[in-house]
Amino acid sequence: MIKFSKVFPSEAHDEVWLTLVTPALSRITYEEMAAGDEDPDHLVAVADEKGGYMGSLGVYHELHCLEHYYSNLAHNSSEDIYELDHLGNCLEAIQLSLMCAGNTSLYSFQWPNNNKEARKPKTSTASDRTCVDWSRIEQWTLDRSIGLSPRLKRPKVSEGHAYMDHGNEDRD
C-alpha cells in the first residue's frame, strides 16, 4: 500500500500518484465490454496491432479524481468550467464508491495526547477492515495497460444514430 508523507502538492507526491494511476487505462476485449453491458460498437478502440477497447476500472477513476488539486482555477475560462464540471463528476464518483463499499469499521475519537487545550478530538480506529486484494487488481491492470497516452480510433457510426457524433478519423 502506498503511503503519502504529505498531502500538499509536491514533486514526490506527484510521482507516487503517477505510479499508482499509470496502469489506469487498460485494453478490454469486445466480449468483456459486452459482458459489462457496454456497447463495443460505439466505444473508443485502441489503434494498435493488439486492438481491443480502452477501459478503466472504477477504482482507477476514483484514484484519478483524488490526484487533482485544482488550485489554479480562475473560474472564468471555458477550460476552468470544464475542469469544475469534471471535479463535480469526480466527487460524485467517489461518493458513490464510498457508499457502495460501505466501510463499517468502527472509528472512535480521542483527545490528542490528553491535551486539555485541544479544541477537537482526533479520529482513531483499531477495527479490522476487509479489503480487496489490491495487488491482484493492480497486476490485472498492469498486464493490460495501454499507457496514459494510447493511440486511439473512433467507431464508425451511421448518420442519425442515437449516440453522439463520433466522426471517423483516427487520433494519434
Image: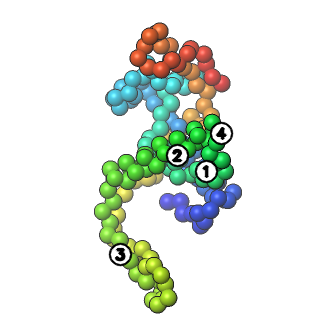
Of labels 3 and 2, earlier in sequence is 2
Answer with the quarter of the image where residue 10 lies.
bottom right
Q: Which residue is mark 1?
A: 70
The residue at the far right in this view is 11
Mark-to-mark CA distance, 4 and 2:
15 Å
Query: In the image, residue 80 lies at what x, y percent?
Result: 62, 42
Lateral position of residue 82 relative to residue 11, left or right? left
Q: Kindly report the distance in space between the C-alpha atoms of the residues bearing marks 1 and 4.
A: 14 Å
Circle 1 packing at 10 Å, graded few (<14), some (14-19), many (20+), is: few
Q: Residue at x 55, y 16 (%)?
A: 167
Q: Which mark is residue 87?
A: 2
Q: How dense is the environment of label 2, judged by Cα within 10 Å: few (below 14), some, or many (20 and up)? A: some
**Quick check: can you spot residue 58?**
yes
Residue closer to the observer: 137 or 75: 75
Residue for point 57% across, 21% down: 153
Farthest top residue in view: 159
Looking at the image, is 24 positioned above or below residue 154? below
Residue 108 numbered tag: 3
Q: Mark number for residue 77?
A: 4
Report the amino acid beneath label 2.
Leu
